[in-house]
Image (cartoon, grey):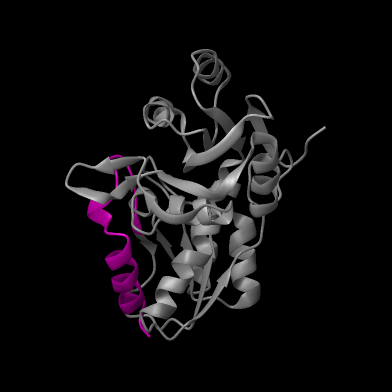
Amino acid sequence: MSLRNVIEVLEAAYPPARAESWDAVGLVCGDPAQEVRRVLFAVDPVAAVAEEALEWRADLIVTHHPLYLRGTTSVAATTPKGRLIHTLIKNDISLYTAHTNADVANPGVSDALARAVGLVGDLVPLQPFPDDPWRGLGRIGELPSAMTLGDFAAQVSKGLPRTSWGIRVAGDPDRPVTRVAVSGGAGDSLLGTAKAAEVDVFLTADLRHHPASEFVESGGPALIDAAHWATEWPWLDSAASILHSSGVTVETRVSATVTDAWTKGY
């Protein structure tokens, strides 16, 4: 199976045209004619993931986050990103990124997050595209039955991979919740959308103090704030399964290496 064939399947599921204009998605390094036998899926293109790829003898790394989001004029091995590029090229390992185009896909990052924390039934975008109501940012879904916010938070903690600081909750722990909105990655921009959707709780990442405080004070849904890496990690298995379901004959592996920026809580 060539790298070109693998990319065709990935881009059918995650069209690059759906990425934000500021994003940097697609093939970062690698020869499209290269043969691919093993594909490693990870959230971040960092040294620890490259080491895992080397050890497992992967031919391709597919990450959610871009390596050079803001562009660069050099890939010299004098910086961490430059050293990573050198490591990959020297060892014939390609790097491909699906970022905001995977966020808005159907299924995408938030679908995987929703299933990981126990939402059932049909999922609909929290902020759908005007031209496609089944694609867009975030997802809204239902719990099988009502439970308290505290119980749901415990369920979220079990459903997501463990990080140094776990999850944070804003709201009455005894509040009943049934209708839930989720958004993988940073979700500050969707706070108003979640409130307008009349959900009981909004699960996302990277919430800041003032917007979260004002949101709760204004009577919005309860909030659950998880680690950015943890909310996007469930997507990796979904992306790997797309290759298999499309008949791509490669071996896949989901990286369990925790690449969250925060390494210790006290």
Image position, residue 97 (x, y; %): 40, 58
Residue depicted at 55% across the width and 32% down the height: 206
Residue lying furthest right: 266
**Picture residue at 60% right of the left edge, 48% below the top:** 230
Q: Is residue 156 above or below residue 209?
A: below
Task: Please state the horizontal and vertical placement of residue 131, each as a whole percent of the image.
Answer: 16, 47
Q: Out of 162 and 40, give the one closest to the viewer.
A: 162
Spot occupied by residue 144 in the image (x, y as percentages of width and height): 55, 52
Q: Is residue 160 magenta?
A: no
The residue lying toward the viewer, choosing from 67 and 140, is 140
The N terminus - image quarter: bottom left
Residue 239 placement, left or right of 117: left
| Tag count | 0
Q: Is residue 191 above or below residue 151?
A: above
Q: Name which residue lies at 66% across and 40% down.
A: 153
Name the quadrant of the C terminus. top right
For the residue pair 34 and 65, the one nearer the viewer reads as: 65
- Residue drawn 45% across and 66% down? 239
Q: What x and y, as percent, mark residue 245? A: 40, 79
In the rendered image, residue 8 lying in the magenta stretch gets the answer yes
Q: Is residue 161 visible?
A: no
View extreme (left): residue: 131
Task: Name above or below for residue 171 compared with residue 243.
Answer: above
Q: Is residue 125 above or below residue 253?
A: above
Q: Which residues are magenta?
A: 1-26
